[in-house]
Structures are given as C-alpha cells and as structure tokens.
Image (cartoon, rainbow, N blue to C red):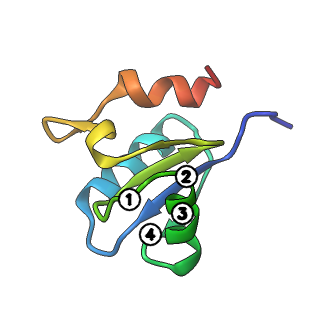
C-alpha cells in the first residue's frame, strides 16, 4: 500500500483540459478521485484553501492546489509542475 497522498481532480462538464489532465494522470499510473468543481463540497474545500477560480481543472494533493493556469502551457500539461506531485516531492 502506498503512503502517497491522494490526488483530487476538480472538473466541469465539457472541459477539454480536464480530459487532458485525467489522461496525463492515467498515463503516469496516478490514482485520483474526480469531483464536480461546482458542487457545494468542492467549492467550500477550494475556498477555505484560498482557491477562487471557476476555470477547471484544479488538481489537489494535500493542501496544494494547482489551477488551470498552473497546470497548462500551450495546450499541454506542464510536466515540470505535475510530475513532482506524482512522485511525492
């Protein structure tokens, strides 16, 4: 059993970047939970952690939240940003 913290992907319907991020995580063997970004629970979790965005996706690991602006560049997942979370760095 791994002691790595769980990844959570907050998504919206019809979100191409959400699909890109989920595909990236799956290709790297990373387990994650998907949550509806507009649910009351998700909005509360993000807001109490200082995340006030409406653009998906948002990636959470522990108390680290990465927004779409952090996660993507030129239409691709920023490996240098996401990869350290997968390794537990």
Residue 52: mark in rendering: 1
Upstream in the sequence, badge 1 or badge 3?
3
Nearer the observer: mark 4 or 2; the answer is 2
Tally of marks: 4
Distance from Cα at disc 4 to Cα at disc 3: 9 Å
Name the residue: 34% across, 57% down.
18
Mark 3: give few (<14), some (14-19) or many (20+) Cα within 10 Å: some
Q: Secondary structure at mark 3?
A: strand
Name the residue: 26% across, 42% down.
69
Mark 1: give few (<14), some (14-19) or many (20+) Cα within 10 Å: few
The residue carrying mark 2 is 49
Q: Secondary structure at mark 2?
A: loop
Find out whether the residues at labels 2 and 1 contact each other: C-beta distance under 8 Å: no
54 vs 74: above or below: below
Residue 34: mark in rendering: 3
Upstream in the sequence, badge 2 or badge 3?
3
Nearer the observer: mark 4 or 3; the answer is 4
Upstream in the sequence, badge 4 or badge 1?
4
Find out whether the residues at labels 2 and 3 contact each other: C-beta distance under 8 Å: no
Distance from Cα at disc 2 to Cα at disc 3: 18 Å
Distance from Cα at disc 2 to Cα at disc 1: 9 Å
Find out whether the residues at labels 1 and 3 contact each other: C-beta distance under 8 Å: no
Where residue 61 sits: x, y (%)? 60, 42
Find out whether the residues at labels 4 and 3 contact each other: C-beta distance under 8 Å: no
Residue 37: mark in rendering: 4
Name the residue: 37% across, 21% down.
80
70 vs 17: above or below: above
Give the image quarter of residue 71: top left
Q: Secondary structure at mark 4?
A: loop
Q: Is 60 in front, or is 32? A: 60
């Amino acid at each position: 059993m791994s002691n790595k913290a769980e990844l959570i992907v907050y998504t919206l319907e019809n979100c191409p970047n959400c699909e890109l991020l989920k595909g990236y995580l799956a290709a790297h063997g990373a387990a994650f939970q998907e949550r509806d970004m507009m649910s009351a629970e998700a909005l509360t979790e993000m807001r109490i952690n200082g995340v006030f965005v409406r653009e998906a996706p948002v990636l959470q690991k522990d108390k680290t939240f990465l927004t779409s602006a952090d996660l993507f560049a030129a239409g691709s997942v920023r490996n240098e940003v996401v990869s350290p979370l997968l390794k537990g760095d």
